[in-house]
Image (cartoon, rainbow, N blue to C red):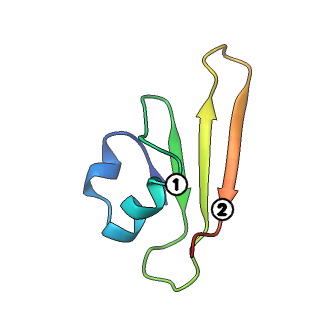
Amino acid sequence: MKWDKKSIKKAPAIIKTNTELFGTLRRGQLLFTTDPETSDHIVAAWWPWGDGQSISVRIVTPD
């Protein structure tokens, strides 16, 4: 699943909790998650640096 600054507001509670690992989503940042209905959660944050070339990707398995 893909979440952005706007859609994260309507996300299930487990997704919002996982978002807190990365701070607040800002414009242009994305959060990718596994289906919130599954027991195994994987979260990936996609953060562009704003230079049009560089990004950071962080992947976690929250407990």
Identify the disc placed on residue 60. 2
Secondary structure type for disc 1: loop
Q: Residue furthest right?
A: 53
Image side of residue 34 versus residue 56, left or right: left
Residue at 50%, 83% (x, y): give it: 38
Residue at 51%, 42% (x, y): give it: 30
Q: CA distance from mark 1 to mark 2?
A: 9 Å
Report the residue marked by disc 1. Answer: 21
The percent position of residue 43, horizontal first and vertical second, equals 58, 61
Location of residue 11 by image quarter: bottom left
Asked if marks 1 and 2 touch (Cβ < 8 Å), the reply is yes
Image side of residue 46 versus residue 54, left or right: left
User: Which residue is at the front of the view, 18 or 38?
Assistant: 18
The percent position of residue 10, horizontal first and vertical second, equals 26, 56
The percent position of residue 44, horizontal first and vertical second, equals 62, 54
Q: Residues within 10 Å of mark 2 (few under 14, many from 20)?
A: few
Under mark 1, the amino acid is: Leu
Residue at 59%, 47% (x, y): give it: 45
